[in-house]
Image (spheres, rainbow, N blue to C red):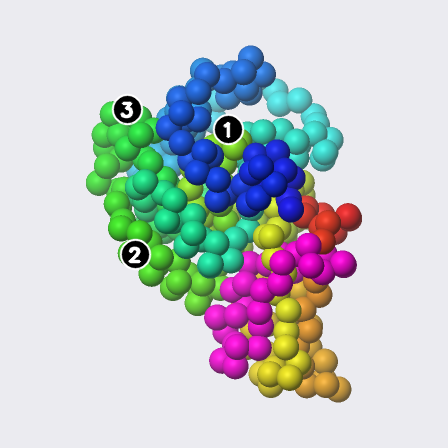
Amino acid sequence: MCQFCIQHGEGKKWYLLMRNYSDELLRQEFSAGQKEMFDAPTRAEAIVRMFGAVVMPAITGVAKPENENAPARPQLGEAEIVARRQSRDFGQVLPIEDVEQVIDLADSITRMPCACRFETTGKTDQRYCFGFGVDRWGVLGKYPDAASSLETLTKDAAKKIFRAYDDEGLIHSVWTHGTPYVWGLCNCDHDCMAYRGYIERGGPAAFFRAEYICQVNDDVCTGCKNCMSQCQFGAQFYSSALGKVYIDPTRCFGCGVCRAACQHDAITLLARQAHPDAANIWLKRET
């Protein structure tokens, strides 16, 4: 299991623990260290600030101006950056089956403009982010102009959208704000800042790999290569001699979106811990 499962999930999948979505956790007083990190007394207030700084620019189309008087950020090593992210905002890749279990836990689901897509493409109409319990966060009272850009969804409607994103090859991920509080789900690709910084540029980790890896059934695979266009982690390879696709378990993040492109159901999920080569790989390739 990933680090969060041990720390915040009672040895099970942390994102399926109802406590991590609770109003009690949202309103809980931060520790002194957390207050300093977030400059806020509670997760609720921290999320309101995050919403104003990150989501509102994507809604209004007006980037937040740089604060020239802001103190210089300390220079941290990669391990320190990852540890800080894990305390503040961190994610984990999920296959569609686990996404739907998370949706079933949410008390309300709100689709909103994606801050990453606004940052990377300048578009304000890209709604790839789904928040949980937005009405409980307190942002609607402080940002009433945002209401018209927030789309409240039923669970069935949200699942249908995620299935469509799965077909497109978007990577699903669950995110914290003030770990272990779960604020929502995202759908990532090249335009996602977390994906771009971590996967494309090889920077410090921003999310865990999934609790699974994908594997190919050689008896069923026809070698059509359709699945290879879906993989955003460079984990799939083709053997001309065998006419088969191979998935490297040490590179696979377990998102499972490659399955949507396979017309022969040749790709299945395997629990990460069941594969000796992938069992302890959650961030970088090192075990």
Query: What percent of the width, then of the height, locates residue 97?
Result: 47, 59
Q: Earlier in the sequence, mark 2 or mark 3?
A: 3
The three-letter code of the residue at mark 2 reads Asp
Q: Is residue 248 left or right of residue 71?
A: right
Q: What element does badge 1 sit on?
A: loop
Front residue of this view, candidates 114 and 68 = 114
Task: Please give the residue where the numbered disc 3 appears in the rendered image.
Answer: 142
Is residue 197 visible in this depiction of the protein? no
Answer above or below: position of 169 versus 62: below
Q: Which residues are magenta?
A: 251-278
Q: Which numbered dot is residue 178? A: 1
Q: CA distance from mark 3 to mark 1?
A: 20 Å
At which x and y percent is residue 18? 44, 38
Seen in the picture, residue 32 relative to 266 is either above or below; the reply is above
- Does residue 244 appear anywhere in the picture? yes
Q: Is residue 272 magenta?
A: yes
Callout 2: helix, strand or loop? helix
Amino acid beneath label 3 = Lys
